[in-house]
Each structure stands twice: as C-alpha cells, then as structure tokens.
C-alpha cells in the first residue's frame, strides 16, 4: 500500500509539484497459511466479509478444498478465479480475464484481491490490480520457490507482449505477502530446481554465507523441497529456513531503496542481461531459472576472463549450477542472440550494459566497458568450458512442459498449437535428461503444479471452464502462442 504527500509551488510561468509516495507492506512467514488455526490471513478479510481469489488451476486442484474450508470456517464468502498461466500465456487476454472477474465480483477499490500461485500468477494478477481503477489492493500467497524467494520481494507486476518479456507492467505493492514454505512439499522437483537459480543469483553477488549453505546442501535441498518433504533431516530444514530468510532479507535490503528502479545498477539483475531472449526466443521456451542460469554462468566466465572472479571461484560457481541440474548453456545461445540481447538491454538500461557480475564471489561489480568482440570471445570460451560438464552444460528439465505453457479452452486451434509445443518440450526434456517423460493429455508435473494433474484443458477428465474468466469472450492465453513462440 502507498500514501502520497505533495507540495505545489507557484512559479513565474506556472506551478511546480513535488510528490513523495510512502510505500508500506508486510511479509509474514507462516507455515500452513490455510490451516484453520492460523487466522492471520482471514483477519485481512473480516472487514469485507468476502474474498475474491485468483489462483493457478493446478494449485486449486491440489489445495482448493483446503482453501474453501479455511474461508468457510471464518464465515467468509469465497469466489475463485481459476486460471492457467505459463510464460507464453502471460498475456493481455489472461490479464483481461482477471479484470472481468473483478468486475463481476464488484470489487471495491481498497478491497484486496487474494492472489495464490507462483510468480507468473502473482505478476499477471498483480498487474490487473494495478490497472483496475488504477490502484486496487491485493495480498500475495506465493506457492513456488521463485514466487516465494524472488517474485514476492519485488513490487513489479507485468505481462509479456509479443516476444518481449514483461514489456507491459507497473510498480504496485501488495498489502501483505504470506510466505508458506509447506507448499514446496508438493512442488515438482523441476520447479524446486527452477527456483534454486534465484538463490544462487542473490548469494553469489551479495551474500556469501548463503552461497556456502547452497553449496553444502544443494542436492538435499532440491530432493526434499527445501526440507519440507517427509523424512527430511532437521539439519536440512534448518539450513533451508536460514537460506530462505536470509535470501529474502538480502533482496529486500537491495530492492527497497530502489523499488521503482530509478537506479539501474541493480545487484539482483545478475543473470538478467541476456536471459529475457533465452526465455522467449525458443519455440519451446526455457524455464526462467534455467534462462537466468545460462546468463549467470556466461557472465561468470566473462568476469573470470577479466580476472574479476578467480579460477577457483569460477569453477565453484559452475559446479553448483551443474550439481543443481541448472542450465549453463543452450544450443541457441550464439553470437546473434548475444548481439540482440545486448542491444535490447541497452535500451532498458538507458544506454549502458550494467552487467552485474560476481567480484569476488559474494560481491558484485557492474560492467559497462565491454566491447562486442570481448563478449563474443567470452562466449566462445564459455562454450569450450561447457564441454567439460554433463550435457555440454544444458540443464535437467530445462524446458517448459504442458502445464507451464498455459491453455486457452475456447480456441482449439491455438490450444492444439500450444499442446504441440508443450509435447516438443517434453521430448526435449526427456531426451536431454535421459528421464521418462509423459506427454499430451497424460499426467505431467508443471510450473505451479504441486500435483500430477491432467493437462490439455481438462481436470480429472472433465472440461474445466475458467471461473469468471471469459465474460467478454476473452479467453485465457489466447495470444500466448501467436504473441510468443510464433512472433
């Protein structure tokens, strides 16, 4: 939430306005946010007597009954907008479907929408709240590692536009964010790995003790859902809790003085110089964590070439990516993509590269004086180094699958195209990882998945219409393929 104070001064030719906005919001660590004995979330809605919730379909399939029981226990009327948001369906039609639900619900300006899901859901629903009457409140309950660790920290909300990631958006703070790490018990390992990249990002450039813990417990953290799965050692859970709390705290300390990104030298932009193209250029996109890992690994090689990162630190960082199963390279990362990514980020960063790199490990330097030839030479060297790693540096389950992609249920042509791309992703994941992958209308794990759910627009074999999602014929993800993979 925010409050604005301003002054108006008369000048010789008109007036001068100075305005200052106070932004205030809270984070609460609360395992079991939807357990009826935990009344903290319900108290946020007692004034209104009702709740409009926006959630991912897969989250609802897993936790819907518990969420409904929770609000019923506190005599709060609940309306749920269920959506499917993947990177290719993080679009204006998805945004508008949420707006339609807000209109039908009759949301008041200060009444908070409840947003439950991963970073993609909180991004799009948050943007809908930012746009609706120019400022509608919302409360976040993130359910993925990326949602909990990264998206929850920022006040940025957005949708993709064409082949451009987060091109349309706003800065809009939630009233409150509840951080419940028990959601990780049911999150697929591929998504645990996906979010692990964000913790490497912040720790390698700003918090060495957290990096040390990630390095020590890497495989155990991924295998046990950050210590939340049954049978996880107490030592692993304690380490996970320390990593999560300190990682979030460090990102908040770095971000809160610069919430509107007026300053463009941002430590947490490590891994985000070339990654937007990695994520959206392939017809079957890379998961976000893998895209930024490729960027981080290449940036580390660039830093090592400049003697900013020692050989020992460079190898230690690359080995952690490899152990985590994260991508460090991709066959489509070539000099052409490097040039395009550089040109795009120069526009975003006001004409400077501002590439964040570790120097040394646990600290950060920004590079602005790198020539095109130096960037290309670093890429050639990086690809040679990758030959020493499994799969030539490509990651495990690096591509989105059917549940990541998002579906439109009323546009069968585009749904078929999306499913074809998703099946291709499954093939790529399966062939690269050497793992068995199930495709098509079968059972798959996906982003925000939390359970094995049926894809291709059906839940439990029955057609599932999006709640309140197509009042004006606007279907979820309608442009997800044409604006993304085919753009």
Image: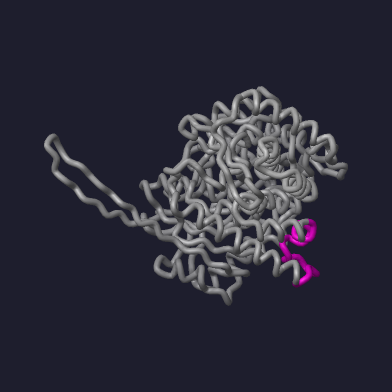
Q: What predominant SS class does the magenta segment belong to?
A: loop
Task: Name the residue at the bottom extreme.
Answer: 37
- Residue at 51% over, 68% down: 41
From where the camera sits, is residue 443 visible?
no
Q: Which of the two residues, 296 or 368, is positioned nearer the viewer here?
A: 368
Instruction: Give the quadrant of the N terminus.
Output: bottom left
Counting from the top left corner in percent of width and height, residue 328 is at 74, 39
The residue sitting at 77% across, 42% down in the picture is 395
Q: Which contiguous range is marked in magenta?
A: 219-234
Please report the residue visible at 43 percent of the width from the left and 46 percent of the height from the top. 260
Q: Position of residue 175 (x, y in %)?
A: 44, 60
Q: Position of residue 2 (x, y in %)?
A: 36, 56
As rendered, which of 26 and 435 lies closer to the eye? Answer: 26
Viewport quadrant of the C terminus: top right
Does the magenta-highlighted stretch encompass residue 229?
Answer: yes
Q: From the viewer's perspective, tell me whether residue 320 is left or right of residue 471.
A: right
Above or below, 91 relative to 230: above
Residue at horizontal 61%, vertical 24%? 372
Whole-percent x, y for residue 155 in the image:
47, 51
């Amino acid at each position: 939430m925010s409050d604005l104070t301003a002054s108006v001064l008369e000048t010789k030719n008109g007036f001068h306005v100075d305005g200052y906005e106070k932004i205030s919001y809270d984070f609460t660590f609360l395992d079991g946010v939807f357990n009826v004995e935990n009344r903290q979330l319900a108290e946020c809605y007692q004034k209104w007597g009702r709740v409009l919730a926006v959630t991912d379909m897969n989250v609802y399939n897993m936790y819907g009954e518990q969420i409904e029981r929770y609000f019923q226990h506190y005599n709060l009327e609940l309306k749920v907008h269920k959506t499917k948001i993947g990177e290719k369906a993080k679009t204006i039609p998805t945004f508008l479907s949420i707006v339609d639900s807000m209109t039908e619900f009759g949301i008041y300006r200060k009444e908070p929408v409840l947003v439950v899901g991963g970073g993609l859901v909180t991004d799009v629903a948050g943007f809908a709240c930012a746009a609706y009457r120019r400022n509608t409140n919302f409360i976040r309950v993130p359910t993925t590692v990326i949602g909990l660790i990264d998206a929850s920290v920022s006040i940025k909300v957005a949708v993709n536009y064409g082949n451009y990631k987060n091109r349309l958006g706003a800065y809009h703070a939630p009233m409150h964010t509840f951080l419940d790490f028990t959601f990780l018990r049911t999150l697929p390992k591929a998504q645990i790995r996906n979010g692990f990249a964000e913790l490497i990002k912040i720790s390698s450039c700003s918090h060495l003790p957290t990096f040390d813990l990630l390095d020590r417990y890497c495989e155990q953290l991924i295998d046990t859902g950050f210590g939340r799965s049954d049978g996880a050692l107490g030592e692993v859970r304690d380490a996970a809790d320390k990593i999560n709390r300190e990682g979030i705290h460090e990102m908040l300390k770095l971000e809160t003085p610069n919430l509107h990104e007026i300053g463009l030298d941002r430590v947490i932009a490590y891994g985000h110089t070339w990654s937007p193209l990695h994520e959206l250029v392939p017809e079957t996109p890379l998961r976000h964590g893998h895209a930024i890992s490729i960027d981080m690994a290449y940036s580390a090689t660039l830093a090592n070439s400049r003697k900013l990162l020692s050989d020992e630190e460079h190898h230690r960082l690359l080995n952690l990516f490899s152990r985590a199963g994260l991508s460090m390279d991709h066959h489509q990362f070539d000099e052409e993509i490097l040039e395009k990514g550089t040109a795009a980020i120069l526009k975003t960063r006001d004409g400077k590269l501002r590439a964040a790199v570790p120097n040394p490990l646990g600290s950060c330097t920004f590079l602005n004086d790198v020539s095109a030839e130096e960037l290309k030479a670093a890429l050639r060297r990086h690809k040679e180094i990758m030959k020493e790693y499994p799969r030539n540096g490509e990651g495990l389950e690096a591509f989105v699958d059917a549940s990541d992609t998002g579906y439109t249920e009323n546009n069968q042509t585009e749904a078929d195209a999306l499913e074809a791309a998703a099946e291709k992703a499954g093939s790529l994941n399966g062939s690269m990882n050497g793992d068995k992958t199930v495709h098509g209308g079968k059972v798959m794990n996906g982003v925000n998945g939390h359970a094995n759910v049926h894809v291709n627009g059906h839940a439990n074999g029955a057609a599932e219409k999006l709640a309140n999602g197509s009042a004006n014929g606007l279907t979820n993800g309608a442009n997800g393929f044409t604006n993304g993979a085919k753009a």
